[in-house]
């Protein structure tokens, strides 16, 4: 189970400190954690963080390297993938971000920096379907999300699942990628629920 890899925003808003450390490993529960090469799963993920969290992470350990408005952590998460932190001035405002970059590709941090600036410089707030699903996954507590196991059809096994409360129909476990537009809307916080669809992110 290791799809993914394009540069992608995985959370909207600023996570608090508890959420932040959960966000650092959004895939901790995956069933093949000890066996798979997870570089593609993590590389490309990014989200905004508070300035205090950016500075805190800078002070934890000496960075692996510093380049202008970014620095890399010296502890690697998966293979050559590590955390890169950014302090970027966007539309005149200094903002801070965390992203996972595969340093086997020397251009990875610069490409992520450019992608973040492009995504956050858009004049109209909007979300793609993928961004909505990633936000739901990021915001869902570990107890209410997981991965399809042996009880699921073979084609679905290993895919991400979330609990969905369907009112009179009760609570059911559904594939994250299979959520309908109505289910996605129900699981998003109100301030994100009515954002227009974006064509690309």
Image: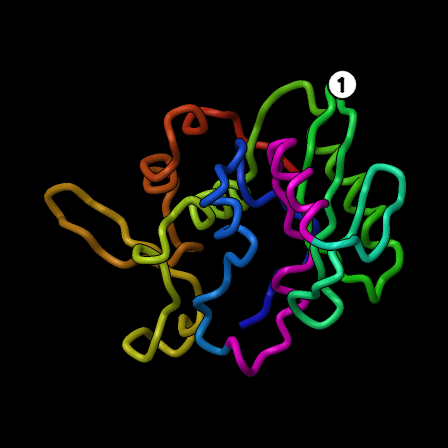
Q: Is residue 59 left or right of residue 1?
A: right
Q: Residue at x 77, y 16 (%)?
A: 92
Image spot of residue 26 (x, y percent): 50, 57
Residue placed most toward the observer, 11 or 50: 50
Whether 29 is among the magenta residues is: no
* Residues drawn in magenta: 33-60
- Against 170, residue 49 (above or below) is above
How are the colours assigned in the image? rainbow
Report the residue at 56% width, 54% height from top. 24
Side (left or right) of 93 relative to 169? right
Is 127 above or below relative to 142?
Answer: above
Of residues 167 and 76, which is closer to you in this image? 76
Mark 1, secondary structure of its residue: loop
Is residue 67 at least partly visible in the picture? yes
Q: In which quarter of the image is residue 200?
A: top right
Mark 1, residue position: 91
Is residue 73 shown left or right of residue 129?
A: right
Q: Which residue is drawn at 79% across and 41% down?
A: 113
Could you say which is closer to the camera, residue 165 or residue 46? 46
Q: Residues within 10 Å of mark 1 (few under 14, many from 20)?
A: few
Q: Residue at image x 37%, y 63%?
A: 146
Residue 158, image x, y percentages: 44, 72
Residue 166: image location, x then y, percent: 20, 45
Residue 119, compared with residue 167, is above or below; it is: above
Q: Does 47 lie within the magenta span?
A: yes
């Amino acid at each position: 189970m290791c799809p993914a890899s394009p540069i992608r925003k995985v959370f909207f808003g600023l996570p608090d400190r508890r959420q932040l450390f959960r966000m650092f490993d959004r895939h901790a529960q995956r069933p093949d954690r000890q066996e798979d090469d997870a570089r593609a799963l993590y590389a490309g993920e990014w989200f905004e963080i508070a300035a205090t969290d950016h500075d805190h992470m800078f002070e934890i350990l000496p960075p692996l390297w510093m380049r202008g408005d970014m620095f890399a952590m010296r502890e690697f998460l998966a293979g050559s993938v590590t955390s890169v932190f950014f302090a970027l001035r966007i539309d005149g405002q200094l903002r801070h971000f965390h992203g996972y970059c595969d340093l086997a590709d020397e251009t990875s941090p610069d490409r992520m920096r450019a992608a973040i600036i492009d995504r956050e410089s858009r004049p109209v707030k909007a979300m793609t379907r993928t961004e909505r699903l990633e936000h739901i996954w990021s915001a869902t507590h570990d107890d209410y999300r997981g991965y399809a196991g042996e009880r699921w059809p073979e084609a679905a096994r290993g895919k991400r699942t979330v609990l969905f409360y369907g009112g009179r129909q009760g609570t059911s476990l559904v594939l994250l990628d299979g959520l309908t537009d109505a289910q996605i809307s129900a699981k998003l916080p109100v301030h994100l629920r009515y954002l227009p669809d974006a064509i690309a992110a």
